[in-house]
Image: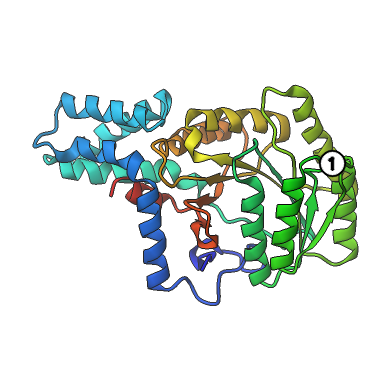
Amino acid sequence: MFSFFKKKTAVADAVVPAAPDPATDADKRRWLDRLRGGLRKTGASIAQVFTGTQIDDTLYEELESALLMADAGVKATAFLLDDLKRRVKQAKATEPIVVKDLLADAIAQLLAPLEQPLRVGEHVPTVIMVVGVNGAGKTTSIGKLTRHLAEAQRKVLLAAADTFRAAAREQLTVWAGRNRAEIIGQDGGDPAAVTFDAVVAGKARGCDVVIADTAGRLTTQLHLMDELKKIRRVIAKAQEGAPHEVLLVVDGNTGQNALAQVQAFDAALQLTGLIVTKLDGTAKGGVLAAVALWSRERVAAGGAPLPVYFIGVGEQLEDLQTFSAREFAQALLS
């Protein structure tokens, strides 16, 4: 069962509540097994580096190649190698297997700022705008999140603002029906107008959360990105201070292209969080290190960190879970 673990819910009334109790040990083991399985292709080449008998330049060169192949990117790879060498020196490590554990610590520390809870309830309704390119799993992720919120006794209204793709509206309608959520849509209508109506209706009906599904956008299609900017502006007119969250759904299989999407959508919309999907079976899961380093640079420039609220490793409801830096690092190197 999909659950928001209590360790993530520091302010009980302001974050998505946990399940009645944290996930059982069995649930947690199943999730970690799925995560390890999903990251196996990414982690196999990295873990293989540590099967030798000595710590030398060859080990670091092989590790550099493995991280680059995992799409950690040049900057994040260099950062992790420098950090790892410092840790090895401090620990006076002599065995490659110890270096592997130190690398897990380095990755976990780099990813730690991405680990933040999704907050709802500070604003009523909390308005969430969801964006992403076609095929990233945007509508499915919205459906899973809606299910989660419904189980937490939150009243949800969905805005089917992907008005020109019938399949998206139909898929969102199915999720709304399953979760007793309300939905507002319009065949071929103006996406901004649909979103405006949804936010106004959400306020009038006492909804806790309004989630707007938007059409998939390629970042190179400037006129389509402009439409997303318009939707964002219109949401602000419907409710002052909204949208409270602008979430980008990215496909973990796309590697460094995922980072390019993050940068482009952030420049246009000022993102507040990420959902990373399809990490099952990918050889490019190292891109989260690149995203984390970029997020660190964003903070250094005066911005806020960009959290990864959820990661997905499959199609089932329980395959979308809150992101844990330590769990991810350990699964990557297991």
Residue extending farthest to the bottom is 20
In the image, residue 217 above or below residue 95: above
Which of the 4 image quadrants contains residue 93? Answer: top left
Place of residue 148 in the rendered image (x, y in percent of width and height, measured from the top left): 62, 65
In the image, residue 103 above or below residue 154: above
In-image side of 58 versus 182 (left or right): left
In-image side of 116 versus 331 (left or right): right
Q: Residue at x 21, y 40 (%)?
A: 99
In-image side of 268 versus 334 (left or right): right
Q: How is the image coloured?
A: rainbow
Residue beneath disc 1: 191
Place of residue 182 in the rendered image (x, y in percent of width and height, measured from the top left): 80, 63
Residue 305 seen in this snapshot: no
Q: Residue at x 84, y 41 (%)?
A: 191
Q: How many marks?
A: 1
Q: Secondary structure at mark 1?
A: helix
Which of the 4 image quadrants contains residue 295? Answer: top right
Q: Amino acid at mark 1?
A: Pro
Q: Residue at x 50, y 76 (%)?
A: 21
Residue 28 seen in this snapshot: yes
Which of the 4 image quadrants contains residue 29? Answer: bottom left
Place of residue 253 in the rendered image (x, y in percent of width and height, measured from the top left): 48, 37
Q: Classify 10 Å Cα crowding around label 1: few (below 14), some (14-19), many (20 and above).
A: many
Place of residue 92 in the rendered image (x, y in percent of width and height, measured from the top left): 15, 40
In-image side of 221 versus 84 (left or right): right
Q: Residue at x 78, y 35 (%)?
A: 228
